[in-house]
Image (tube, grey):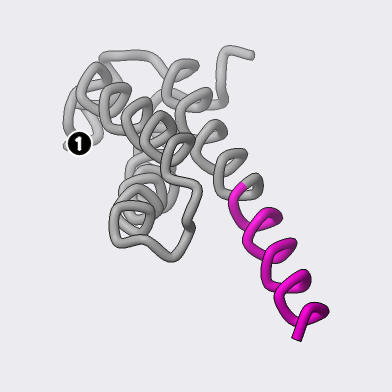
């Protein structure tokens, strides 16, 4: 039983830090995009997406349980940015400034 608990603990830890990196990637990517490209792509404004991704990262940092509903919501917000907004903005603005 102890071994199973340890495996579960380390799996949750790996998922927690992996999701933190995932959320940080979305925030950093949003910071590097040009503001006019967001409305031009038909998406919400850059400050709005910065707020969403920053809150996602902050909440994800403090909610250590990755199976929590709030953690799922932050994962969904980050996934929407990276899967929908990022490609559209990238198509308009080109590669990142960095």
Q: Position of residue 31 (x, y in %)?
A: 44, 17
Q: Quadrant of residue 78?
A: top left
Q: Residue at x 31, y 47 (%)?
A: 77
Q: Local crowd at mark 1 within 10 Å, few (<14), some, or many (≥20)?
A: some
- Magenta stretch in the rendered image: 1-16
Decide whether the magenta segment is chiefly helix, strand or loop: helix
Q: Quadrant of residue 87?
A: top left
Q: Residue at x 37, y 25 (%)?
A: 54
Looking at the image, is 82 positioned above or below residue 53?
Answer: below
Q: Position of residue 14 (x, y in %)?
A: 70, 55
Looking at the image, is 30 positioned above or below residue 34?
Answer: below
Residue 16 shown left or right of residue 75 in the figure: right
User: Residue under circle 1?
Assistant: 43
SS for callout 1: loop
Q: Position of residue 4 (x, y in %)?
A: 75, 81
Looking at the image, is 1 positioned above or below residue 25?
Answer: below
- In the image, 77 versus 5, the foreground residue is 5
Residue 94 shown left or right of residue 74 in the figure: right
Asked if the stretch drawn in magenta spans residue 5, the answer is yes
- In the image, 6 versus 90, the foreground residue is 6
Asked if the stretch drawn in magenta spans residue 13, the answer is yes
Residue 45 shown left or right of residue 77 in the figure: left
Q: Quadrant of the N terminus?
A: bottom right
Q: Position of residue 32 (x, y in %)?
A: 49, 16
Q: Quadrant of the C terminus?
A: top right
């Amino acid at each position: 039983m102890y071994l199973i608990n340890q495996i579960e603990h380390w799996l949750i830890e790996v998922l927690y830090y992996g999701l933190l990196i995932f959320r940080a990637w979305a925030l950093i990517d949003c910071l590097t995009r040009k503001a006019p490209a967001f409305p031009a792509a038909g998406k919400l404004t850059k400050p709005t997406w910065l707020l969403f991704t920053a809150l996602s990262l902050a909440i994800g940092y403090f909610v250590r349980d990755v199976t929590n509903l709030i953690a799922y919501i932050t994962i969904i917000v980050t996934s929407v940015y990276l899967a929908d907004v990022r490609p559209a903005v990238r198509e308009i603005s080109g590669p990142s400034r960095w």
